[in-house]
Image: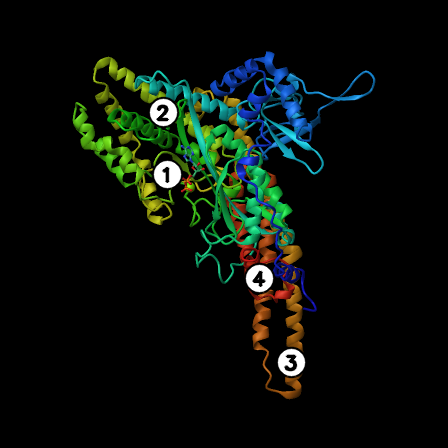
Amino acid sequence: MPHATTRQRIMLELAQNRKSENGTPQSIPSYFSCNCFNDRVMRERLPKEVYKKLRATIQRGEKLDMSIADTVAHAMKEWALSKGVSHFCHWFQPQTGLTAEKHDAFIEVDEEGAVIERFRGEQLVQGEPDASSFPSGGMRSTFEARGYTMWDPSSPAFIIEGPRTNILCIPSVFISYTGEALDKKTPLLRSMESLSQAALRVLRIFGNSVATRVITTAGTEQEYFLIDKAFFNLRPDLRSTGRTLLGAMPPKGQQMEDHYFGSIKERVLAFMQDTEIELYKLGVPVKTRHNEVAPNQFEMAPIFADANVATDRNHLTMEVMKKVADRHGLALLLHEKPFAGVNGSGKHNNWSLSDSEGNNLLEPGKTPEENLQFLVFLAAVLRAVYYYGDLLRASIASANNDHRLGANEAPPAIMSVFLGTQLSAILDAIKSGRAAKITEEYIIDLGVSKLPAILRDYTDRNRTSPFAFTGNKFEFRAIGSSASVSLPNVILNAAVADSLEIIVAEIEKELGKQGDFNTVVMQVVRKHIRESESIRFDGNNYSIEWEQEAARRNLPNIKNTAYALDALVAPKNVEMLTRQRVFTIGEIESRYHTKLEQYIKTLEIEADTLLHMINLMVIPAAIAYQAQLVGAIRGLRDLAELAGEVSCSGEVALLKQVTNAIEVLRSKGEELIRALDKVDGIDDASRKAKFIADHIVPLMSGLRKPADELEHIVADDLWPLPRYSEMLFMI
Ligand code: ADP
Ligand code: MG
């Protein structure tokens, strides 16, 4: 190929089919968790008494006994040094960005000027990064720049391998000098505590005096795209926004549906396996991998863990994936909608509750009594989604996720709950039940006693619901692929805790009036099943009929982040969140402002990048093609003069099309620039975000159209941007 363009050269290289070398496979148990300061290592390396105290802290969520900190730090350091670690860092989750780390070497200089490696208890427990550059959403005034990181012993420390030496990462919370949460982990830990307390109250009224804690469990299914890094590098939009702002649909998209669960291509498999090896070393039990619906889209899922650890592991997973992809010459796209018109990526958050004895509280039991308890938890979740659906919607809101929610493959922005035919039938029976006294037979008649059998072989799995009951857990599917699962879990935990407390209080009050426990519980459950009925929906959530039905049911359907975020500061929501002690008012407002800011910045960067690409890439390519056409028309006209009967009407028609598209691009570009100027003039962040949603977003899609039309007509060797058909199908 004599004049191959960069794009064409990449495609030729891809065809050379780089094979990855095959290492000798090792059994997973032989190296699993080798870079993780887990329970086994602690037991081996700590004096028995210290180990017992630390374990109590971890298991019972107790405060760390500071007298053991030095011993733990020393053991951790010795372990780390044996693994080639030179530096440690407090690893935390500020409100923007995924994770943050500031490295410090273990070294100290002694009086003789020699260097020794030391790690003190206070260094393990507390760090003091300069907090001034992290977003606080206006919570901290600038003169109060101090923030602390504090070790979270409930999530194990781990080692990240560097190119030369390794780094010991200590999962930490990040709080301000005055004790307010600046991060995503603190509220999660608080919400897990609230939920534990509320759930224990339920267990107690059911006579359980054994359980000491209730743990929120989470399993995160991570979707992502992989494309060749060379394509990625050629696209300014992917580089600066994570998604393609332009790009014509390929002749073959995902219509054939031949990718889902298809055999995994070798280059991708090599990436997946290397990622898994890295994650196994860190103690992340990734279990499942498969092709997703869209071409070059995949999924990876771990075995669930307590929600705090699961959240940390998901952060780690995203980081490791990015690193390994890069090593393989691939670009990892975690964006919720990297390609318009193609399936987007989400992160399913499987969520349940487990007591300290390991019993899953969303698993129906064997006896009618146990099933009654299950129904209380179920009613609480329904109540939580019914009252706080708007807040759950806000918790998953981002500029990225706006492209995905409500697109034809993702759950809509309407929060509803799927329960499945049989469980729904039981709830309907309970709802309409008139019996005053709830006898054993009555429970059996309702089908409640048969719950486990029914749920075990449930067959109707609705994949379109944003929030689905899947046998013994709920699956919150509306979370975006690049997002932290922290806030959605915080909101869910807080709302369910609140509902449990209300339900328990109602049961206790009724029990004071009348004696029969089953009858009282059933009455309260029935009340909440009735009240929350409108959020139950088992049909196709992607359909227009559901949107209409949801409107009739008065369910909120907030299509974009700018409006969805209002729920974060709605009085009823602020009341609940503060009542549950997961946020202070200041902390909520700070999240609200940070999220608005992120939305605004994301869209501003996207708009600027789009204009840049139109002006510097698309229009020049069109002009080059225009020049070719003009040359051809001129030549053909000359020829016609000489020889007669030569038509150039095709070329003229094409020229008109190209010229027209350039004109439209120019005028729509100017319009976008004028609108962006207006954005600058708006002070209030919420108004600004709403203006962007209402005006900038539509202008951007309007600007995209003529560019995508040009992609279909401009000569291939003049088109500078990798196409969808290349990025999505070549790897
Ligand atoms: P799917 O069919 O949606 O892929 P899976 O059964 O594979 O569902 O489970 C998906 C995720 O749910 C996994 O990460 C799994 O570990 C997690 N999961 C299973 N049980 C629980 C639970 N009790 N709590 C939280 N997550 C769970
Ligand atoms: Mg799933």
The residues bearing labels 3 and 1 have C-alpha atoms spaced at a distance of 67 Å
Q: Quadrant of the C terminus?
A: bottom right
Q: Nearer the viewer, mark 1 or mark 2?
A: 1
The residues bearing labels 1 and 4 have C-alpha atoms spaced at a distance of 41 Å
The amino acid beneath tag 2 is Ser
The amino acid beneath tag 1 is Ala
Which residue lies under the disc numbered 4? 711
- Compared with residue 385, is residue 523 higher up or lower down, i.e. above or below? above
Q: Nearer the viewer, residue 377 or 367?
A: 367
Secondary structure, mark 4, is helix
Ligand 2 within 8 Å of disc 1? The answer is no
Number of the label disc, if any, that sits on residue 468 = 1
Which residue lies under the disc numbered 2? 499
Q: Nearer the viewer, mark 2 or mark 3?
A: 2
The amino acid beneath tag 3 is Arg
- Compared with residue 598, is residue 709 higher up or lower down, i.e. above or below? below
Secondary structure, mark 2, is helix
